[in-house]
Amino acid sequence: MVNQNRKTVLIITYYWPPSGGAGVQRWLKTVKYLREYGWEPIVYTPENPEAPAIDNSLLKDIPEGVKVLKQPIWEPYSFYKKFLGLKKDEKINAGFLTEKKKPGLAEKIAVWIRGNLFIPDARKYWVKPSVEYLAKYLRSHPIDAVVSTGPPHSMHLIALGLKEKSGIPWLADFRDPWTNIDFYDKLMLTKGADAKHRELEKAVLKNADVVTSIGRQMADEFLQLGAKRVDVVANGFDETDFSFSNVTLDTSFSISHIGSINKDRNNETFWSAVKELCNEVPQFKENLKIKLVGKTDHAVLESLEKFGLQQYLEKTEYLPHDEVLKKSMSTQVLLLLLNNTPNAKGIMTGKFYEYLAAKRPIICIGPQDGEAAKTLEETASGKVAGFEDKQKMKSILKEYFEKYQQNNLKVESAAIDNYSRRKLTGRFAELLEEIAKH
C-alpha cells in the first residue's frame, strides 16, 4: 500500500516487465527498493512495446501496490520488418547485432532511415501524447520528482516536455550515451540529422536538474556537453537474485559469455589465444567448453569456425533472468568482451556487475586502464588483457586453468557488496531528495 508520508517519483521507462533483456534491470531493481528510502514510485511505460524478449520471471520484482501507468505506443517496426523481410514476431536486435548474415542493401537503407528519420529513435511518436497524458494525470496526482531513463532517449524528451510545462524536478538517467554511443557513426547521419540529435541531447542535459550516468567517462562527456550536474550511479546486482541453493560448478573448464555479442565485441585475438592453448596444452583442450548464452553475431560463429573451436561450443538462446544467473554461477570462468570502439574505456555493461556477484573469475578483453579494469582490481574479481595482447590472454587462461585443475578457482571479495542494487538505490534517493527541495 502507498505510504502517504513518502515522497512520490514518476519513472518514465520504455523497458518494464514482462519485457526482458538488460534495459529493464536498472530501474526495475531501483523501484524494488525505493520505498525503503522514503520514495513511492509510479512507473510510466508503453502498453505494447517492441520488447527484445519476454521474461515473466521479472514480474516478481515489482513491489506490491506499485502504480504502473500504461499508454499505447505506435512504433514503425511493422514497416521496418516488412521492408527487411522479417516475420511479425521476429525481434529486432540492438547495437547492430546480426545473427544470420552480413547486412545487405535493404539493411543499410533501413539503418539510414532509422538514423535520419526517427530522431532520436523509433519511439519519437510516443513523446507528444505521453506529455499530454502525464500533464493531465499530474494535475490531479501531484508528485515530487520525475525520472527518465534512456535509451531509448525519447523517454528523456517526455520528461523534458513535463519540465517545460510544470517545472517539476527532473533526474535524467543515462544507461548508455547518446551521440557518444559506440554505434553512432554507423547510423549514416546527414549533417542535419546529426545536428538534430546533438540539439536534443543538449536540451536534455541542460534542462535536467541532475543527470546520472553509469560511469565516470560518460559523466565527464555530459559535463562537457553542458549538463548542469552529473552524478555517477553505477549499475549493480540484486543480492536476492543470487540466493540459489542448487548451483553446481561445471566439471569442464567452461568459459562463458553471458549476454549478446555484436561484431564490435568479437575478438579474434582471444579466439586465436584459446586455439593456441588447445594446441600447446592437451589437458586444456580435453576439458575446454565455450558457452555463449544470448544473441550472437554471425561474425562470432565464423571466428569460432575459423579457429576450429566450434567443437567446444555450447550455444544457448535467451534464458529467463534467474536461469542466466545460475549459468553465470556454475561456470568456471566468465568472459567479458568489451566493444573495441573509441569509448571502450568507459564501457560498464549491466551484466558486468552480475558477473561480479556470481563470484566466478572474470577474464576481461578491453583497455587495461578502463573503468571495468579498475573495478575488477578493486573487487579482486578478475584480470584484463588488451584487445590485441594475445600473450596476456594466454597467461590469464593458463593461470585459471591451473587453478581449475587444483580445484582452487574462486573469488572472495567483500568489495563486491559496494555494487548492491539496494545500496545504489539509496544514492538515487539522495539525489531525488536534493532536487525535490529546490
Image: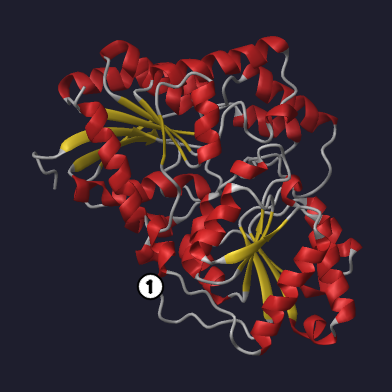
Q: Nearer the viewer, residue 359 or 257?
A: 359
Closer to the camera in the image, 110 or 212: 212
Determine the image quadrant of residue 9.
top left
Q: Quadrant of residue 311?
A: bottom right
Q: Residue at x 26, y 41 (%)?
A: 429
- Horizontal side of 392 relative to 173 (left or right) equals right
Q: Is residue 240 visible?
A: yes
Asked whether 75 or 158 is in front, the reply is: 158
In the displayed structure, 63 sits above or below 176; it is below
Q: Where does the image place residue 37, in percent across and percent down from the top left?
A: 21, 47
Q: Residues within 10 Å of mark 1 (few under 14, many from 20)?
A: few
Left or right: residue 40 versus residue 338 is: left
Total marks placed: 1
Quadrant where the C terminus is found in the figure: top left
Residue 316 showing in the rendered view: no
Q: Residue at x 27, y 51 (%)?
A: 33
Q: Three-letter amino acid code at disc 1?
A: Ser
- Which residue appears farthest toward the left when viewing the image? 5
Is the residue 201 above or below the residue 293 in the image?
above
Figure check: 336 above or below 166:
below
Residue at (70, 77) in percent of width and height: 399
At 62% from the left and 76% from the top, the residue drawn is: 332
Helix, strand, or loop for circle 1? loop
Here the colouring is secondary structure
* Position above or below: 391 against 438: below
Q: Which residue is mark 1?
A: 243
Residue 257, how many percent across, how many down? 65, 62
Q: Please indicate whether residue 59 sits to the left or right of residue 354 in the image.
A: left
Q: Position of residue 319 (x, y in %)?
A: 55, 62
Nearer to the camera, 90 or 380: 380
**Residue 127's x, y, as percent?**
44, 20
